[in-house]
Amino acid sequence: MPIAVTGDDFRLDTATTSYWLRRTPFGHLEHLYYGPRLPAGDAEPVALKRTAVLGASVDYDPGDPLYSLDTLPLEWSGQGYGDYRFSPVEARMPDGVFASDFTYVGHEVVAGCVPIDTLPSAYDGDQTLRVTLADEATGVELDLYWTVFEAADVVTRRAVLRNAGSDRLTLRRLLSGMVDLPNRDLELHTFDGGWIKEAHRHVRPLTYGTHLNGSTTGASSNRHNPGFLLAESTATQDDGWVFGVNLIYSGNHLGVVELSNHDLARVGVGIHPDRFEWVLEPGEAFETPEMVLTVSDRGLNGASHHFHDFVGRHVVRGPWRDRERPVLLNNWEAHFFSFTESTLLDLAKRAKAIGVELFVLDDGWFGARDSDSAGLGDYEVNRRKLPGGLDRFATRLKRLGLDFGLWFEPEMVNEDSDLFREHPDWAVRTPGRRTTRGRNQLVLDLCNPKVQDHIIESVGRVLDSADITYVKWDMNRHVSDAYSPTLTHQGEFHHRYVRGLYRVLREIFEPRPHILLESCSSGGNRFDLGMLCFSPQIWASDDTDPVERLKIQEGLSYLYPPSTWAAHVSGAPHQQTLRATPLSTRFNVAAFGVLGYELDLKYLGRLELKELREQVDFYRRHRRTLQFGRFSRVRVPKGNKVQWQVVARDGASAVTGYFQTLAQASEGFDRLRVIGLAPTERYRIETRPQYLPLRRFGELVKHILPVELNPDGLVMRTAGKVRNVPDDVERYDASGAMLASGVLLHNQFVGSHYNEQTRLLGDFGSNLYVVELIDE
Ligand code: DGJ
C-alpha cells in the first residue's frame, strides 16, 4: 500500500517517489523528505538536524530550546508562535486574535480519494491520508489531506478548516497546502505572459526572500499560470531533481516560495488572499482546492511526464478523456463577425475537402452580435446570418460529412443586449462606484444562483436545438468591480464566482457527454487544472504564429499534456505578429497539439490545398501518438533550434519535430536525437514529405533556369501556382541507441549549393520525422 504509518511517521510512496512526514512530540507535522523513492527504513538520516539553538529564534516550549517553529521543516504552520515565514493561514479566530497553532489530534488512511464537496478534484487516487489538527485555544479544526496517485507519481494536498469554536471565525487566507523543502540550489520556473504570449517560461535563482506567483484577475490568468517548478540549477531536460506544483482551480491563485535564512524553501499554493475574506459561523467549514505535487530526478521532462500522466488519468474525465479529438476548422480568423450561411457552407465544403472533421462556428452567430459591442448574452440565432437556424445549418454540415461545433461566451454580457436590458442587476458592478469594462462587456454575476440557472437553461436549450458535438466556451475579460448583491460578505465574491462557474459547467455538460468542450479565455487566459476537469482541451492562445507557438506550447508542455492544447494552422502573415512562416511549419508546430485550421481556405491555391490535405491525412494517421503519446522536449545545443518528440504508448513509433527559428549563415551540422526508445530494437526514421514553394528560392531561381526570369514576375508567380519543389527527405534504419545518440542530418542550405538533398529551412523552417519499429 502506498501509505504506511509507523509510530509517528507517515510514509507516502509512489512508483518512483517518496514523501515522508512525522508528528513531532509537540504535535506539529514535520516534513522529512520528498524526492526519488527510498526503501523503507529509518528516516532519521534524511531528517533535518536540530542540534544547536539558533540566535534570535523563539522557543516554542521552555522545555526544549532546540525546538523553534521558525527553523523546523513543516507540513503546515499557523501564526503567532515564532514561525515568521509565509503562513498558509491567516484568520481572525473565534477568540478574536490572529494566532493559530494547529497540532495533531488524529489521523486516518482511507482507500482512494476523498472528493471535495464544493470544488472539482482529481479522481482515481490510490489512498488518502487525513490528519486532523486542532488549535487548542479555540477548538478550531483543520483536516489536512494527502492523496497518493501511485502510477502518476503525484501526491495531492488540501485543507479543510472547521470552525468548531463557539464564535465567528473570519478567514483571510487559507492555502491548500505547504511544505518546507531543504534547498538544493533551486531555481524557480514560472509560466507567464499575457494575451498572445501565454505560458512563456521564466527561470530565476531561488534567492532569499519570498517569491510570489499569482493572479488576481478573477481567473487563473495568462499572466502567471498556477503551475510552477523548482529545479536544481544543474538540472537539464533529462537529469537532476525537479519539483512540480500546480493547483486544481480556475480563480485567483497564489503560489509562494520563500527561501528562509536557514535554507528551507517553503512552498505553498492556494486561493489568492487578495480581497478574500470568508466568514465561518460556528459549525461551518471551508474547503480549499487541491494542490498537486510531484518530484523527479529525471529532469524537467521527468516532472512533466508525471504531470502529463496525472492530467490524463486523474483530471480530464468523461468519454473524451482518451478519445481521439477531431480535426476542426474554426471560422473566426476567416470571418470574424461577418458571414452568411452560404459563406459558412462554402468554407465548410472546402474544409471537408482537406479532411477536416468538425466545423466550428465561432462568435457572431446570435442576437445583434455584429461586433464585440453588442449582443453578448442573447443566445438566439441571428436569422439574417442563419435564416434556417442552427438546426438546418447543422443538418447541412452533416450532409457534407462534418460535425458541428458552436462558440459561446456565457459568463459575459454587453450592455447593448436584451439580457442586460432585462436584468441589469445580473451584471457585476459595485454600487456607487465607476463601472469598468473590458472588450465592451460586463461580467455576469455567477455568484447569483439565478444567473447560474439562466446560463444553464439558455446554453442547454441551444445545445439541444441542433446536432452540436463540440462547444468552445470563451471568457474574454478579467473580472473587476467585484460585487454581488446576493452576498453578505463581499470577500467571498471571487471564490463563489468560480464555484458558480463550476456548477454551471457541471450541469450543462454532465448530462451531454457527447459534447467535446474546449474552454478558452481570449486564448490561454484560463489554462488550468480546474477547467480541465470539465474541458479536455483548451485553446492555448489566440496567437497562431508557429514561432510564437514554439514558446507557448513548449511552456504549456511543462505542466500539461499535448491532448489539452488546441493548436491551429492559420494564414500568414499572421494576424498577431505579421510574420510570414512556411505552411509546413504552421502544421509541424500545430500537429503537436489538438489540430485545427483557422483560415479562409478560398484564398489558398491548388498546391496549398493539396498540402493541407496531406497534413490532415498525416495527422489522422498519427493522431493517437500525437495527442496521447509520451511528449518530451529534446535538448538541442543551439539557440536557434527547438525539438519536440512524442513516443507512442506502446513504444513502436514516434514523431519528432525539428524547428529552426532564425537561420544562421553557413550553419554546421544538425543532430536529431530521439530519446526513450528501446536501445536494441531497430527503427526506421523518415522525414515527413513536405514542399517548398518556388518563391522560397527568390532570385536564386535564375541560377538554375536556362533563361533569366523576374523572381517576382508574372511567369514565376504563375509557375508558383502550379509547381512547388518537394523538400528533402531522409530515411535511415537505426537502433534505438543510435537514435538516442543522434542522427546527423543532411546539410542545410549554406549559400553556395542546392540539390534535392539540401535541407532548405531558412527562417522558421522545420521538419517532422516519423520513427517506426522495423518488424523483423
Ligand atoms: C477570443 C478567442 O480566443 C478567439 O478565438 C475568438 O473565439 C474570439 N474570442 C471571438 O470573440
Image (tube, rainbow, N blue to C red):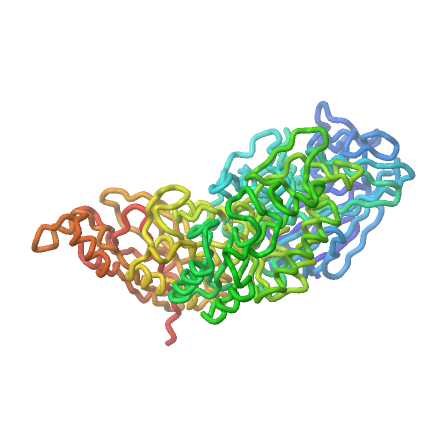
- The answer to whether 182 is drawn above or below residue 1 in the figure is above
Q: Residue at x 32, y 57 (%)?
A: 604
Q: Quadrant of the N terminus?
A: bottom right
Q: Is residue 379 left or right of residue 395?
A: right
In which quadrant of the rendered view does residue 137 lie? top right
Between residue 373 and residue 745, name the one nearer to us: 373
Between residue 305 and residue 186, name the one nearer to us: 305
Q: Residue at x 56, y 65 (%)?
A: 391
Between residue 379 and residue 311, name the one nearer to us: 379
Q: Is residue 627 left or right of residue 226?
A: left
Q: Is residue 761 left or right of residue 130?
A: left
- In the rendered image, residue 347, in percent from the top left (x then y), is placed at 41, 60
- The answer to whether 131 is drawn above or below residue 217 in the figure is below
Q: Is residue 224 visible?
A: yes
- In the rendered image, residue 165, in percent from the top left (x then y), is placed at 89, 40
Q: How many marks?
A: 0
Q: State the residue lying farthest toward the bottom.
A: 776
